[in-house]
């Protein structure tokens, strides 16, 4: 899968800054350009490692899940590790 179009990266950059701002979080010692570069690097990492991620999945899931399902699974697992409250807001109660 190719990296995101520049407009989508820009939307992520704006959205994550808005989200952090609404939470009252400050990103010390970082500029907007630093956050932009982090969005770009994360997108590139996802692209560079998509084959390894796919190979790490169980064969049955790998063969039958769509790219969207695989991406959602990765996003949910990472979010659950770092912000379960936000995950609950997105997918409902997780139990």
Image: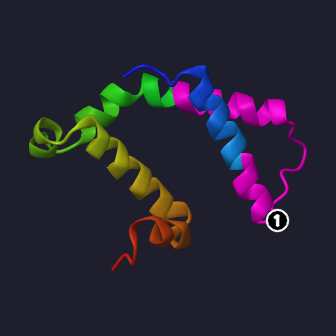
Relative side of 80 to 38, left or right: left
Residue 54 position, x and y percent, is: 27, 34
Q: Going 75% across and 66% down the picture, which residue do you hit?
A: 23
- Number of labels in the image equals 1
Task: Give the colour scheme of this rendering.
Answer: rainbow
Q: Can residue 41 be seen in this view?
A: no
- Where residue 57 appears, x then y in whole percent? 23, 42
Q: Residues within 10 Å of mark 1 (few under 14, many from 20)?
A: few
| Secondary structure type for disc 1 | loop
Write down the region rendered in magenta: 17-44
58 lies above or below 89? above
Whole-percent x, y for residue 12 in the image: 62, 39
* Residue at horizontal 61 percent and vertical 30 percent from the top: 9
Going by the image, does 42 lie left or right of 20? left
Q: Give the farthest residue toward the right.
A: 29
Q: Tell me residue 7's x, y (percent).
A: 61, 25
The correct choice, above or below, for 53 with respect to 79 in the image is: above
**Quadrant holding the C terminus:** bottom left
**Magenta span has 69?**
no
Point 35% across, 42% down: residue: 71
Judge by depth and name the residue closer to the eye, 43 or 11: 11
> What residue is disc 1 on?
24
Q: Which residue is drawn at 57% across and 30% down?
A: 8
Question: Considering the image in quadrants, where does the N terminus appear?
Answer: top left
Residue 85 quadrant: bottom right
Q: Is residue 18 magenta?
A: yes
Quadrant of the rendered structure where residue 47 is? top left
Q: Is residue 89 visible?
A: yes
Provide the major secondary structure of the magenta segment. Answer: helix
């Amino acid at each position: 899968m190719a990296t995101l179009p520049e407009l989508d990266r820009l939307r992520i950059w704006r959205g994550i800054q808005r989200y952090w701002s609404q939470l009252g979080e400050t990103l010390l010692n970082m500029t907007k350009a630093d956050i932009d570069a982090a969005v770009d690097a994360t997108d590139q990492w996802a692209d560079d490692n998509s084959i390894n991620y796919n190979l790490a999945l169980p064969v049955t899931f790998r063969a039958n899940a769509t790219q969207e399902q695989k991406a959602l699974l990765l996003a949910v697992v990472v979010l659950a590790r770092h912000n379960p409250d936000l995950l609950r807001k997105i997918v409902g109660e997780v139990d």
